[in-house]
Structures are given as C-alpha cells and as structure tokens.
Image (tube, grey):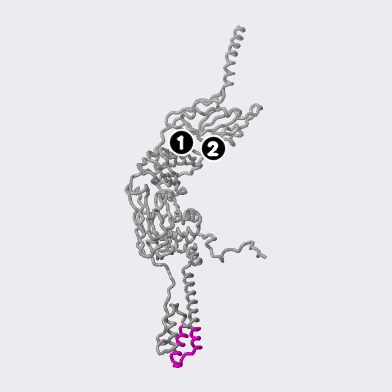
Amino acid sequence: MVNSRWFLSLFLILWLLPVCVWATAVSPLPLSASRTVLSLGESLTLRLELDADEAEALDLRPLERDFTLGGRRQSTEMRLENGQLSRRQRLELQLWPKRAGLLEIPALCQGKRCSATLPIEVSEQPQENSAAEVLLEVEPLPAQVPQQAQLLYRVRLLSRVPLLQARLSEPQPEGVECRLVPLGDERRFELQREGWRYEVIERGYALFPQQAGLLRLPPLVLEAQVAGAEPTAIDPLDPFAGLTAARPGRLLRRQTPALQVEVTAPVAGPGSWLPAQGVRLEDDWQQAAPLLRVGEPASRTLVLRVAGLPADQLPELLLGEMPGTRLYADQPQRSELAGPQGLSAVLEQQLALVPTVAGPLVVPEIRLPWWDVATQQWREAVVPALSLTVAPAAEPTATLAAPPPEASKGVSGPTAAAVEDAASAPAQIVEPATDQAARQTAAMAAAASPATVTAAQMHLWRMFALFCAAGWLLTLVMVVLRRRRCVRPQPAAVAEQTRPALLRQQVLTAARRNDARASRQALQRWAQSLFPTGPAPLERLLEEGSAALRQASAELDRTLYAPSATDWEGQALLNAVRDWQAPAAERPQHELLPPLYPPSPRR
C-alpha cells in the first residue's frame, strides 16, 4: 500500500514538472490599456513591460491592421527582487483606431514571450455640434475654379477647453500641380455659438492650380491633448512608479472632410489668360498732364493693381508706338500683399518720354484684357488716350535796339552819319538801363549843339559805340548762362522733392482728405524713397512697420479693389503713418550723432 502511494506521488511530480518549466519559460508579457471603450477619433494608451536587453526585438506590425501608431514613450526601471537587481523597460504606445466596431489588440511577442489579446470596443464618432468641446471646420469650396485662379482654403479650430500640444497638418493638394501660399499669420479671436464661448484659431491658404483637372484636398488632421490628466494606476509596492508613470491628458483627434474641386481650362479671349477678382490700371498723366518740350524728358508712372493673383503672374504693360518721341522704360517693380481676402499684387512701371518733334502728340490708350472670375466673362482695364502739345525747344530771346528818334532829327554832318552807321549796325541785345540813359543824354546834347563835329569827336563817338557793343555782348553772355542755369535741374530741389519726410507728409495729406487712390500712390512713393534698392519697397515697409500700418493698408486695398465704390476713412492710415518710427536716413542731419572716431586731417 505504501509502495503504491509512493509510485503515485512520483508519477504526479514527473507529470507536473514539464508544465511548471514551460510556464516559467514562456510567461506572458504584461500588457494593459488605459481604456477599452472609446469613440472613433479618440485614442488609448497601451502599456507593456519588457526585458531591457530585448526591448528592440518587439514586433509592432500586427497593431497597424486596426490602429494608427501615435506617440511612443520608453522608460527604464530598476527593481530589487530576492536580492538581485533587475532592469525592466516600460513601453507606452498611443493608438488611434482606424474604424468603429469590436477591435482586438493582437498578441505582441518579444522572443518566446507573447502578450495576451485585448478586446477594444470603438463606437462611431458623434456628430459635431455646438456642444462639442473641440471643433475643426473648413469653409466650403466652389465646385469649379478656372486654371491659375485663386482658391481660398480656410480652416478654423474652435475650442472651449484648454489644449496642450495641438498639432494641425498642412494642406497637401493632389491631382494637379498647385501652388500653395499661406495668407499671413494665423488669426485668433472669440465667438459665441448657442451659448458656448469658443476660442478660434483660423488659418488661410491661397491655392493656385496650374493645370486643368480634378484637384483633391485630403483631410486636415488635428491631434491635441486636452488639459486635465487622466488618472494612471500606480503600483504601491514599486518605489519608482511615481517617477516613471506617465500622466498624459485626454487625447483628441479631429479631421476635416476630404474636398475636391474641378479645375477648368482657360477660356479663349482677346488677350492673355489673366483670371482675377479685380484689375485696375492707373496713369499719373490722367490726373495732371505734363508740359512737354522738345529735348526735355518727362516721367510717366503706370500702376497695375490686381486682386487674386501673385505678383509673378502679372503681365508687363504693352505700350503703343508714339512717332516723334523716344521712350525709355525701367524694369517693372512687383510687390504683393497677403490678407484675409487673399493675395493682391501691384506692378509699377516707370517710363521716360523725350519728344523730338514739336507739335501735337497723341499718347495711345492701353488696354489689358482679363477674366473676371466672379462674373465669368472677359473684361478690359483701359487707360484712355491723351492728346498733348509738344512745345519747341527753349531758346534765348533777343530784342533789337532802335536809335532814339530824337537823336536822328536835327543832326547834320558827321553826327548824322555816325547815327546812321550805328542804326545800320548788326542787331544787338538791349543794353542795361544805365547805358541806354547815358546814350540818350549824349545824343540829345549832340543835337542841341549846332557846331560841326571834329575828328576828335568822331573818334570819341567810335569809342563810345565800341563800349556799348561790349556791354551788349556781356549782357548776352549773362542771359545765356542764366537760362542754362534755370533749365538745369537743381540737385537740392530734386533732393527736396524726393526726401522721405516730404513724401511721408504727402501720405498724411492724402489720408486726411480720405482719398484712397492718392493715399495708395503716395504710400508707394514713400516706400520707394525709404527702400530704393529693394525689389518690393511697399511690402518691406509693411513688414518693418506696425500691425496697425499693415491693417490700414489691407483696408485700403479692399476699398480700392471692391466691386462697387465704397467710402474710405483715412484716419486709421493717418494714425499708423504718424506713429511710424522713421529710420535714420529720414531724420534731419542735426539729429544724427557725430561719428565716434572722426577722421584725422591729412598732413
């Protein structure tokens, strides 16, 4: 009986020993999830404990079937067990479910150790409404847009809870080649929606498709962490658990719907393809026609303003032929400004016209066809023709001097012959008043004396005639030099007209009169004087200026490019320009500090 019991015990020991060894060798990996029930668009945190020496051997590819891998965190723990120091590595994975339904976290293996499967229940994402904590909206797009025309793409993030580590993806147009231009910095404001107060962050983009076809805009994805950490279980027996346990907030994921727009081909028309929201041509000669003179240059400024296109798409202005003139054109200056309503571009063309023939001159009109994207029809921006008159070249005028009648009457003999010789002499310039009075006095004295003229008196008259001729010649030289000095432009006067302080005052004067067009022209000239070497002086002025100056300039552009005429108040521009700090180049010379090390005089 004893032997049978002994054999039974030995049999049980031998049967259970392999099972215990197998269980010890292939103990499962510890795995846990922060939540097992969630909605589509929310995330969960998956935690695993691994051997530190084999942490890189973990295969995570089975998770990619039903989940999108997000953030990843690792931490190493030191544990003292049975007098032995061991290292354990804790891995935390952020998982986003790809679909709704009953999902399963598959077994993850590290070597021979594998974790158990874990079921996850994912419900459909609720419809966003005014009660949602975080909303991601995008403005609807038109069904069609012409090729190269501007397409505004605006996305808004509305939140009534604090967000941490929010990240919004950028648009990635697909289907056709497309140019993407951000519309300045993101806008921040607040709004009320059905009793809830939201903080809004808005981003704007201008898209310019360069090909005809189907333009696809994939969804924009927002990943954010809501303030307020979710509780994390901490092992009370682990002395390092409080240091290594992660306490992330609640993670949210929102995305916009995918959009698509049909890009149509250009429409044949009278000119090159120029799709825009508004086009305006300006000519400074239309406001004040210049006085043209043969041989003297006259400057002309043409400005093309276009709403809804970048600056590099603006065409150069084609000028008609003008017989009897020589035309010199500078390189066009291009600039653009990004605002909430999109891009607006400016092309400025400086011309110098030199007439070569006097008489009537017809300056031909300038026509620029463009496609109006709002009305879907061709339109033209026109600068009317001008009829001017070219004056002859300036020449010094001369006045003939006739002998006094009193001096020729009653004079006989040599005196009369001398007077006739003086009268038949070549025409001379009128002498000064003092010389003329002396001559009249001498002639009257000679007429009053009836005595005959001797040879000495004849020699005296000849010397007097030579003296008068020398005086006339000197007067002619002085008149010619004075006229040349008047015609030649004075550097001081030119510098005074182009001085930045004077041009800045012109901006203030035009804004005080509420004249939008004159304010824009004066603002462009002022920027050109401040930054004469830059490619876009107005854009540089707005960048270095204040936010009030940029906002006032954008409001001015909206007024100029509005489909219908609107009133414009220049007080905002007046205050912004008045508060603008002038650079050192604009300050008077007496305000500038003397040099720290003045140059030593040369010996």
**Residue ID for mark 2:** 247
Left or right: 240 as drawn, with respect to 229: right
Identify which amino acid the numbered label 2 is placed on: Arg
Viewer-side residue, 121 vs 331: 331
Image x and y of residue 266, in percent: 35, 44
Q: Amino acid at mark 1?
A: Glu
Q: Secondary structure at mark 2?
A: loop
- Is 124 one of the magenta-colored residues? no
Give the numbered dot on residue 246: none
Identify the magenta region.
Answer: 436-463
Q: Nearer the viewer, residue 470 or 243?
A: 470
Q: Nearer the viewer, residue 123 or 308?
A: 308
Above or below, 432 against 41 in this view is below
Q: Residue at x 61, y 28 (%)?
A: 53
What residue do we see at 45% from left, 58% from top?
524
Q: Alpha carbon of mark 1 to alpha carbon of mark 2: how far?
A: 17 Å
> Residue 42 — which label?
1
Residue 242 in the figure: left or right of residue 172: right
Crowd band around label 1 with a 10 angstrom C-alpha radius: few (<14), some (14–19), many (20+): some
